[in-house]
Amino acid sequence: MMKTTWEEVKSRIKSVLPQNTFSLWINPITFLGKEEKAIVLGCPNKFSLNWVEENYLGLIRDEFCRDGARGRDIILKVGPPKKKPRRSHHPEQLCLPNMPIRRERHGGIRLNSDFTFNRFVVGPSNEFAFSASKALSQTGTWTYNSLLMLANTGLGKSHLSQAIGHAILQQDPETRVIYVTAEDFANDMVSSLNSRNIESFKNKYRRSCDVLLLEEVHFLSGKEKIQAELGYTLDALANDNKKLIFTSSLPPKDIPRISSELRSRLTSGLVTRIDGPDYETRVNIIARKASEYQIALSKEIIHFLASRLTRDVRQMESAIKCLKAKSEFLKAAIELDLAKEVISCLASSEKHIRSEDISNLVSRYYKVSPEMLKSKSRKKIHAYPREIYAYLCRHHTHESLESIGRTINRSHSTVVYASEVVERKLRTDVNLRHQIEFLSKKIKEMKK
């Protein structure tokens, strides 16, 4: 009876939590039984238990109360491990002379010692990616063994990918972790083919790997043979219940010339996107970086930098390094004027343009209401200015594709497609070129 109640509670919780959050934290919880005045639920491991207890125990308790379990306590325990899928048998492999064990663990690329979980600044734009990465780095059973992180350059996907590797090796230094970019994977395969040593390549990635950290999978666009080999490798690792972590600047469905089989494998587990940091997160990142580089910044300077450095973490780190260097070389105190001087080299002094500004401009120019840009209408009179809007937002704002898409009730891939349509037409359509030039000029005037 109570087991059925738990399933009903889960169903209600599913309706109030994001799908990824529910799948990662709530769905794996099982009903273990009843004790005197208590309901006992099982989490897959200790990390999951702590996270659920800290973030979702109140929600779970409230939902049980709705089903008449008022007065009963909720006890979380680490549940019995699930039966692992039957693994295919691979004979023990001999270590080849040219493949020493220590090097094998990292696939020839060393993990960056700075890229650990405790040095990652968490905010609304990356919170789920952080929690999913930390969950995947834990020992014990888990619902998912695969994670794909999507983000533009400099937003932390490589940091989290390598943090997973560090955390796993810290728990068990004998774990065979391979960290490699898609480009290096491709080069490794080509080199093995040329030297007629493809079996050692397969042994390295399929049979001598417990955790694969594969960066920049968008690089595989159009490389059919590499995609096929990677697909076989991922199948072998998945069958053996190994952990797979991928990063990409593009969702697999938007990567040109990628096979449907590989696209399916890359998205078979958790998929999460990391957006640009919001203002408060930028403040925290700048304060953290200043501390790491041992320079003292006033609150005024920190907030000034956060308001101007909106692109990514690398831009913020570059500003901190420049401030430190200028202060030391010039023997000058770090004051607001020095910060402004540094910012003038790293960020434009122009006013930031918002998608709302472009929406109003496009609406006035094409004589449509901003609401029509958001409508589902596919009529040319509405679709055409919507495409122009998407193109201009991509080129003149710092907003993410998702954010732009939300302003017109569309997905980020629709924004990409609409922008590319305009770019293609610009090559041959003189009238469109004049319109874009005029609107771009107006946007530049708004920046002053």
Image (tube, rainbow, N blue to C red):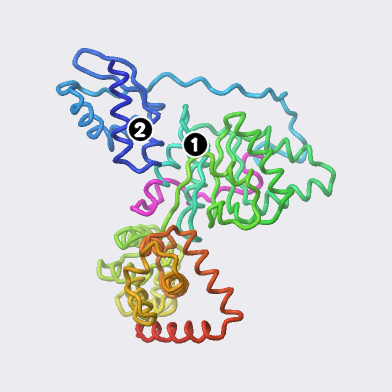
Residue 447 disc label: none
Q: Quadrant of residue 5?
A: top left
Circle 2 sits in a helix, a strand or a loop, which is it? helix
Q: Quadrant of residue 308?
A: bottom left
Circle 1 sits in a helix, a strand or a loop, which is it? helix
Q: Amino acid at mark 1?
A: Gln
Q: Position of residue 7 (x, y in %)?
A: 33, 25
Q: Which residue is mark 2?
A: 26
Q: Give the residue at x 29% y 40%.
A: 16
Residue 405 visible in the displayed image: yes
Q: Give the residue at x 53% y 83%.
A: 433
From what the image shows, is residue 54 above or below residue 294?
above
Residue 294 visible in the displayed image: no
Q: Which residue is mark 1?
A: 170
Question: Magenta residues, as a range?
Answer: 104-128
From what the image shows, is residue 360 above or below residue 117?
below
